[in-house]
Amino acid sequence: MTDKLPVHTAAAPQPIGPYSQAVVAGNLAFVSGQGPADPATGQRAEDIEAQTHQVLRNIRAILEAADSSLDLVVKTTCYLRDMNDFGRFNAVYASYFPMNPPARTTIQAGRLPGDIGIEIDAIALVRS
C-alpha cells in the first residue's frame, strides 16, 4: 500500500477549505489548484501577468516542500477567468517552463474562487 503524505509550507497560501496544498503518493506530487495570493500579505495583483507569476511562485514553493521542482512537473491544468488573457498568461507561463514543458490543459472557467483571474494545479515527480 502506498502512503498518502500531505504537504504543507508557510511559503505558499494556506488552504481555504478541507484540502492539502499538495499530496505526495508514490513518486508523484499532486498540487492543489493555486491562486494568485501572496502568502506573506494575502494580497493579489490585478493583472493576469502578475497573477500568473504569483501562482507559479506558489506552486514552486509547494513543490520544493514536496522534494520536487517546476522542472519535474509532468502535467498542469490552468483555469482562466477570461480566455482573452490567454496570450499574456501563456507568455509568463512559458518563462517558468523554458525547456521540456509539461503536458497542459487550459480552459476558461465560469468563475474562480474569490473572482481571481487564474488558478493552476500541477502533478510532478518527486526526487525521493
Image (cartoon, rainbow, N blue to C red):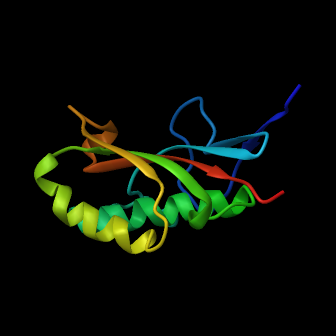
Relative vertical location of residue 104 with respect to residue 26 in this rendering, above or below: below
Instruction: Please give the name of the residue rendered at 51% of the width and 60% of the height, measured from the top-left corner.
Output: 58
Instruction: Please give the name of the residue rendered at 10% of the width and 52% of the height, measured from the top-left corner.
Output: 84
Instruction: Please give the name of the residue rendered at 56% of the width and 64% of the height, measured from the top-left corner.
Output: 70
Question: Which residue is the extreme one toward the top?
Answer: 1
Residues 36 and 122: in front is: 122
Relative vertical location of residue 5 with respect to residue 46 in this rendering, above or below: above
Which x, y percent locates residue 34?
Answer: 46, 49
Side of 94 where 97 appears, left or right:
right
Residue 41, visible in the rendered structure: no
Side of 123 where 84 appears, left or right:
left
Question: Which residue is the extreme one toward the right?
Answer: 1
Residues 108 and 125: in front is: 125
Q: State which quarter of the image contains the N terminus.
A: top right
Question: Which residue is the extreme one toward the front?
Answer: 100
Side of 84 where 127 appears, left or right:
right
Which x, y percent locates residue 65?
Answer: 71, 59
